[in-house]
Image (cartoon, helix red, strand yellow):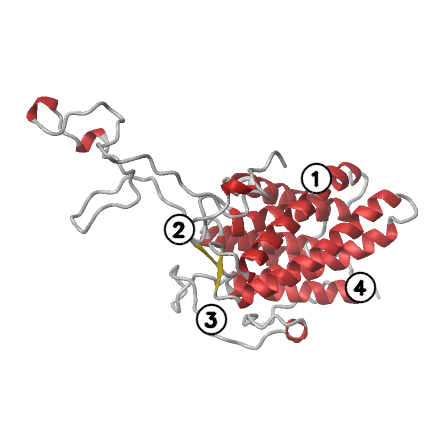
Amino acid sequence: MGNTSSMGCELTSTEQIKALPGFLFTVLMASSDVDQKFLGQFAKNTGNDNPFLSSMLYKVLGLSVILSKKLVRARRLRRLDTTRDTKSLQLYHHIIWLSREGLVIIEQYILPMVADYVELKVLAFKLRASFYHIFVLFHNQPSINQTAIPSFTASPNKGKGVDRSSSIRASPSHENANPMEGGPVRQPGSLPPGLAPVSIPKPSASFLLPATDYIPIASACFSEAAILADSLLSGSHPIRLSVKMEYAAYLYDCLHDGEGSRKLAQQSIRDVYNAQEGMDDDMFEDAAVLVGILGKMMKRGLGSSGTSGSTPRNGSAATPSTPRGRDRGYSDLSAPPALPSPVMRNAI
């Protein structure tokens, strides 16, 4: 993962990291539930043929279970304050550390050994994307929890205030065209007298993980996992649905691409209805839960009229959730129960 910065780089940003939004938390927990179930099966099945791979899978399974509990605690916090040595700061450090260790195991030990597997290969690439997703949510620089990812598209000044997305120094088009017309005389790029350069504080977990922009690599990992899932697994396979569900959540919450998120969720449900492969009872129930969540993701960010708008408030347009979702504690599931197509018959 590269050299991390020293403890002295820690602190003192005044930014507070918001706790996980309710629906995003639901997605992460549902996806993690499916991932952990298959991780346990693969770790057991590879015990005789490849004991080392099996041991690594068990380690990732244990890290995933602990990380899920930490995310549950983070969900209960109104804000995750990273500016003080509090329990929330310790929780923030634990989440980053667990994700970092899980990513190291996936990239260095598991991915090189899964070329001959099908389901396990897709799951390994999906887990790598999930760990980078955690980095983007909790440790990205710049933070996605601020107002939005800044837009650098120039917009006309309508006299309603200063465009805060522009840089501090004015562009040449806003400066005097003729330098002889007056104004302060200073060297280009120099600061005004008495104004010292301001150093931007690094996140407090920089000693665990470099503070950088993880969005490009996370996007690439999700794209690669989705391509593998499409090519290797049937449309109704729970692992494929888990990949698409978390990818759609990532598009919406991290890239602020509501339209792309809704289209991905819609296409994933279509693939489920077009699937002809059989599945056992457990896989059928897992697919039903994930399709139910994808059904709600198709409507995220749409207003009551069905047009694109702000993110729906919790509790709006509530409809009964699937029984399986209630049993697992996914209280934010308010989408109509979208079940797999009747053509997806159980093999048992």
Q: Position of residue 25 (x, y in %)?
A: 57, 62
The crowd level at tag 3 (other Cα within 10 Å; few <14, some 14-19, many 20+) is few
Q: Position of residue 174 (x, y in %)?
A: 18, 33
Circles 3 and 2, Cβ within 8 Å, touching? The answer is no
Q: Which of marks 4 and 2 is nearer the N terminus?
A: 2
Q: Which residue is drawn at 40% across and 41% down?
A: 200
- In 3D space, how far apart are the residues under numbered discs 3 and 4 (Cα atoms)? 34 Å
Q: Which mark is residue 148?
A: 2
| Residue located beneath label 1 in the image | 107
| Residue located beneath label 3 in the image | 314
Amino acid carrying label 3: it is Asn
| Residue located beneath label 4 in the image | 280
Amino acid carrying label 4: it is Asp
Amino acid carrying label 2: it is Ala
| Helix, strand or loop at mark 4 | loop
- In 3D space, how far apart are the residues under numbered discs 3 and 2 (Cα atoms)? 20 Å
Q: Earlier in the sequence, mark 3 or mark 2?
A: 2
Q: Which residue is drawn at 22% across and 23% down?
A: 187
